[in-house]
Image: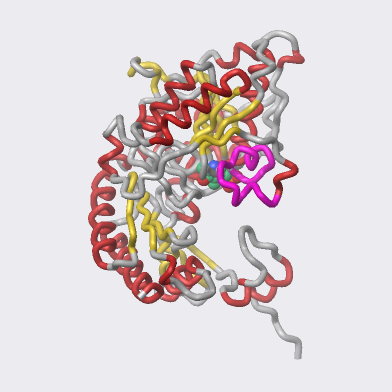
């Protein structure tokens, strides 16, 4: 009799999973998922799992929203793909128009979008590469070839391709590939471990931190060689959900303007309502030269990315063909992905998503405070919009040091998906999560903290 291999066995034989230790595959084998709806994943045994992290920060309106699914099906049956050099199509143009209309305003001019062009690509890291290359080439063609370096913030994350990796401020990501990477200038960045959502309205939050003055001094010292500074506005998601404060962001952005250093905002994880506004930059009234988008751009359904480009930036690329930006990806502006993006933006209007989210944000804050009060293993907790993070006392964790794995496994046993960043447990659900589902997420989180940390 031949043995019919299970999906797990076939997976183990054929697949190399991202961000996964081979040694952990036995202990926590990849879980087969067969369907998803709203914030719920269904595994092969029919069990429902609450997705507390929006499938790695991508899901905006919940899984398989019928409006997006219908748009994808329609587009797939009409025009699946066409090369984007020399061709164009309605979904890409309509999505670009809509993004430009929603994009951050020119500071002091509430009526005018600060952005004039959209460059599409297909993943977050690619949108970062596009921004870095645009910034570099614009300097060359402005006659400033000495301005060729990048600055980044300590503890930051910008993706895994070599250019993006080079501007990751956290050595964790960079280290194994160090010899392959250009060196960036890393600016100190405050951590406000008790950041509250209301602080987003405080234009000075973090401005007086010692790191702010140190960062500005470094920008001043290196201004002659800096093309651009790249930042994750409001939340350093992969960097344990640190929230440096609106005032810090405003201060360094101001210094950049004064010193002729372009600003690149990596909004890949924080755009599309995640902080309570469409774009996180809005809290600091910023209009960076370049804004990188992905993850929630398609509502979290298909790979798609975009780099928004400030009005006028393109002038440096006019003239001789040799001055063109020669960058392309095979799936640039894929029509199906763009149709999903458009449908997602339509939902923001139809379902008044941002207005609805403000009450969800308040509920999240209440539940987070309750969890923090419930266990002295929670050392600090913070919130910005739909993102809440808890710093846990790692000394009380398992003796093998694998705290995140222990928390993740304990939560999964209770039917909840969380994936702590070592000792930082966080919630980052789809914006569509209901009050009842949030309460469930909070209850299970509290039980898991007690189980693992005592
Ligand atoms: C996820 C992420 C990236 C990388 O995007 P990919 O699509 O995974 O390449 C870059 N920057 C930030 C802030 C991210 O969260």
Q: Tell me which corner region of the image, top left, top right, bottom left or bottom right, holds residue 204.
A: top left
Q: Quadrant of the C terminus?
A: bottom left
- In the rendered image, residue 167 lying in the magenta stretch gets the answer yes
Instruction: Tell me if I can see residue 72 in this picture.
Output: no
Residue at 63% across / 58% down in the picture? 18
Residue at 46%, 31% in the rendered image: 214
x and y, in percent, of residue 271 in the image: 43, 38
Q: Is 72 on the left-hand or right-hand side of 13? A: left
Tell me: residue 388, above or below residue 169.
below
Residue placed farthest to the top in the image? 319
Q: Decide which of 241, 2 is in the foreground and name it.
A: 241
Q: In the orientation shown, which residue stands out farthest toward the bottom? A: 1
Q: Is the magenta stretch mostly helix, strand or loop?
A: helix
Q: In which quarter of the image is the N terminus?
A: bottom right
134 vs 140: above or below = below
Q: Is residue 389 above or below residue 263?
A: below
Q: With 87 as the anchor, is 67 left or right in this view? A: left
Q: Which residue is drawn at 37% across and 76% down?
A: 451
Number of numbered discs: 0
How far across and how far down the image is residue 210, in percent?
39, 35
Q: Give the residue displayed 52% in from the left and 35% down from the top.
A: 187
Q: Give the range drawn in magenta.
A: 159-176
Residue 59 placement (x, y as % from top left): 45, 50
Q: Is residue 289 visible?
A: yes
Q: Is residue 263 magenta?
A: no
Q: In this view, does 309 lie above or below 428?
A: above
Q: Position of residue 361 (x, y in %)?
A: 28, 48
Rendered-image quarter of ligand 1:
top right
């Amino acid at each position: 009799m031949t043995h019919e291999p299970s999906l797990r066995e076939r997976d183990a034989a054929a697949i190399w999973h991202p961000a996964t230790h081979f040694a952990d595959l036995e202990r926590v084998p990849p879980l087969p998922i067969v369907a998803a709806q709203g914030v719920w994943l269904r595994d092969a045994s029919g069990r429902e799992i609450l997705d507390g992290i929006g499938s790695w920060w991508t899901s905006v309106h919940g899984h398989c929203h019928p409006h997006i699914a219908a748009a994808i099906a329609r587009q797939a049956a009409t025009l699946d793909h066409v090369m984007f050099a020399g061709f164009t199509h309605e979904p890409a143009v309509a999505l670009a128009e809509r993004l430009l209309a929603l994009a951050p305003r020119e500071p002091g001019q509430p009526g005018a979008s600060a952005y004039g062009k959209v460059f599409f690509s297909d993943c977050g890291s690619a949108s970062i590469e596009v921004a870095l290359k645009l910034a570099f080439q614009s300097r060359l063609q402005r006659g400033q070839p000495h301005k060729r370096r990048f600055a980044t913030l300590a503890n930051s994350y910008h993706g895994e391709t070599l250019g993006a990796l080079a501007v990751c401020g956290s050595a964790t990501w960079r280290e194994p590939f160090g010899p392959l990477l250009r060196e960036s200038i890393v600016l100190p960045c405050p951590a406000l471990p008790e950041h509250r959502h209301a602080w987003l309205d405080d234009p000075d939050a973090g401005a007086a931190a010692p790191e702010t003055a140190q960062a500005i001094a470094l920008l001043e010292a290196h201004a002659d060689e800096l093309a651009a500074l790249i930042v994750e506005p409001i939340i350093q998601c992969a960097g344990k959900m640190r929230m440096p404060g609106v005032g810090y962001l405003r201060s360094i952005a101001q210094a950049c303007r004064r010193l002729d250093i372009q600003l690149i905002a990596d909004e890949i994880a924080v755009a599309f309502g995640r902080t309570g506004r469409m774009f996180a930059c809005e809290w600091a009234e910023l209009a960076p030269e370049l804004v990188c988008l992905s993850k929630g751009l398609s509502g979290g359904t298909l790979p798609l990315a975009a780099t928004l480009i400030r009005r006028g930036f393109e002038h440096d690329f006019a003239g001789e063909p040799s001055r063109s930006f020669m960058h392309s990806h095979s799936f640039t502006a894929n029509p199906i992905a763009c149709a999903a993006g458009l449908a997602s933006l339509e939902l923001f209007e139809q379902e008044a998503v941002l207005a609805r989210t403000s009450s969800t944000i308040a509920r999240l804050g209440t539940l987070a405070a309750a969890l923090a009060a419930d266990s002295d293993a929670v050392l600090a907790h913070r919130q910005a919009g739909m993102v809440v993070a808890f710093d846990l006392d790692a000394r009380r964790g398992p003796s093998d040091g694998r705290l995140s794995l222990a928390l993740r496994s304990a939560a999964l046993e209770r039917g909840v998906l969380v994936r702590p960043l070592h000792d930082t447990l966080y919630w980052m659900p789809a914006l569509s999560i209901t009050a009842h589902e949030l309460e469930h997420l909070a209850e299970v989180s509290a039980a898991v903290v007690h189980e693992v940390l005592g």
